[in-house]
Image (cartoon, rainbow, N blue to C red):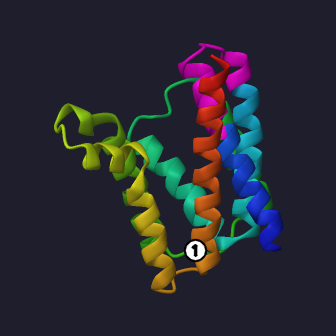
Amino acid sequence: MNYLFLGILFILAGFFMKLSDDAYDENDDLLLATVLGIFCSLACAIAAVSYTGAAYIFFGILIGNLLAFKVDGIHHIITLMIFVLFCLICGIPEISIVVLLIVILGALTDEVGHELIANYTENNFIILFFEYRFVMKIVIFTLALCGAFSFWTFILFILFELSYVTAGVIFKKED
């Protein structure tokens, strides 16, 4: 698959994911959160069925969030079902269970750390480390360096993360 097209999908996925989360968490707007979540799930699913690196990332994030009990609204259930259904219909690339488990562990660590770390430390470095979910960045970078997938996967993930943060900034400005 073309990396430019994948880059656009990763950017859209991150952007819509954050807007969906904030629409629900900050504005209690279930309809908008669901619509934005559907756009996110379609971008994630198209990327996941087209590119092995995307499958690792988006399945890892999904399962990590499920294990962290972050799938906590009907909008999440709807978008999860659309993502899984699309992937089942289109098929996903062959993936290594070991690599997927490493990505899941990274995502789970980020989610748990993001929610809890400020309760246990006042160290700003550690708080910012988990606020901006650096565990996954390190995991994806390390897996790319080890050859588990292309280094492009790391670059695509950074695009996803940057668009996620950008959407958060845009959402805060609208308030």
Instruction: Work out which quarter of the rendered image holds the N terminus and state it.
Output: bottom right
Q: Is residue 53 magenta?
A: no
Tell me if residue 97 comes above or below residue 25 in the rendering.
below
Instruction: Work out which quarter of the rendered image holds the C terminus and state it.
Output: top right
Taking the spot 49% from the left edge, 27% from the top edge, the residue there is: 72
Amino acid tagged 1: Ile
Q: Is residue 23 magenta?
A: yes
Taking the spot 77% from the left edge, 46% from the top edge, the residue there is: 42
Taking the spot 46% from the left edge, 62% from the top edge, the residue there is: 137
Q: Which residues are magenta?
A: 17-33
What's the magenta bit mostly, secondary-structure-wise?
Answer: helix
User: Percent from the top left, x then y, of residue 86?
Assistant: 76, 50
* Secondary structure found at label 1: loop
Q: Which residue is mark 1?
A: 95
Tell me if residue 32 comes above or below residue 43 in the rendering.
above
Taking the spot 76% from the left edge, 64% from the top edge, the residue there is: 6
Quarter of the image holding residue 158? bottom right
User: Percent from the top left, x then y, of residue 129?
Assistant: 34, 51
- Label 1 packing within 10 angstroms: few (<14), some (14-19), many (20+): some
Tell me if residue 66 comes above or below residue 22 in the rendering.
below
